[in-house]
Image (spheres, grey):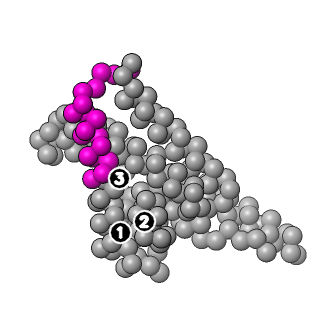
Amino acid sequence: MARYGEVGVNVGSVGRWTRFVLGLLIVASVAMDFYPVTHAHSASSYLMMALSFLGIIGVYTLVHILIGDKLGGKSAWWGTLIFVVPAMFLLIGPAFDPNLQVGHWLNIPALNHPFMLALLFYVGISFFFQWRAKYGGCEVVAIPNFLFRKNYGSYCVPLLPLDAIEKMIVEKRALERTG
């Protein structure tokens, strides 16, 4: 009998390919923003984006090391709270209040745009890691999961409804075939 598995860890074909397409769209949008015809960026902007990208990978890897094993066997909502909420806050918060930008906190206003692009690029690249690993949790932990060969449960909040519906359809079809 075909089984979907657990939402937040496993992913079906629709969820997997949705993540691949989203990764393409996000990486393309970041690339178009940094393409010299659309914007004139300085070398320092590229450097700030690259360092921000590496910093984001470092922070998520460190959190994965420090508390990842403690999440094993716990509700996937804990992983979502710890890993996803900060990224959503950093991406969405500045739309409501510009003071919520990382560059504002560090007193480096020029960092705001490169950091946001680095965070989006991280999410886009992570979608490719999810697609490759057939991982259905949140994209922000896909790279550390790949590095440590562990999949911790967490929900990809925007894709959770799609994953839940796909699981329901896959398991309903499996029951119909056996019964």
- Sequence-wise, which precedes: disc 2 or disc 3? 3
- Magenta-tinted stretch: 38-55
Q: Quadrant of the C terminus?
A: bottom right
Above or below, 101 relative to 70: above
Residue type pointed to by label 1: His
Above or below, 136 relative to 102: below
Disc ID at residue 87: 3
The reply to whether residue 73 is visible in this rendering is yes
Q: Which residue is mark 2?
A: 147
Question: Left of 156 or right of it: where is 10?
Answer: right
Q: Which residue is mark 1?
A: 64
- Residue at the limit of the structure toward the left, as seen here: 107
Q: Nearer the viewer, residue 158 or 23?
A: 23
Question: Left of 67 or right of it: where is 129?
Answer: right
Q: Per the image, is 179 magenta?
A: no
Residue type pointed to by label 3: Ala
Q: Nearer the viewer, mark 2 or mark 3?
A: 2
- Sequence-wise, which precedes: disc 3 or disc 1? 1
Place residue 104 in its image quadrant: top left
Secondary element type, mark 3: helix
Question: Left of 12 or right of it: where is 93?
Answer: left
* Circle 2 Cα neighbour tier, 10 Å, few/some/many (<14 / 14–19 / ≥20): few
- Sequence-wise, which precedes: disc 1 or disc 2? 1
Disc 1 + disc 2, Cβ < 8 Å: yes
Above or below, 8 relative to 107: below
Residue type pointed to by label 2: Leu
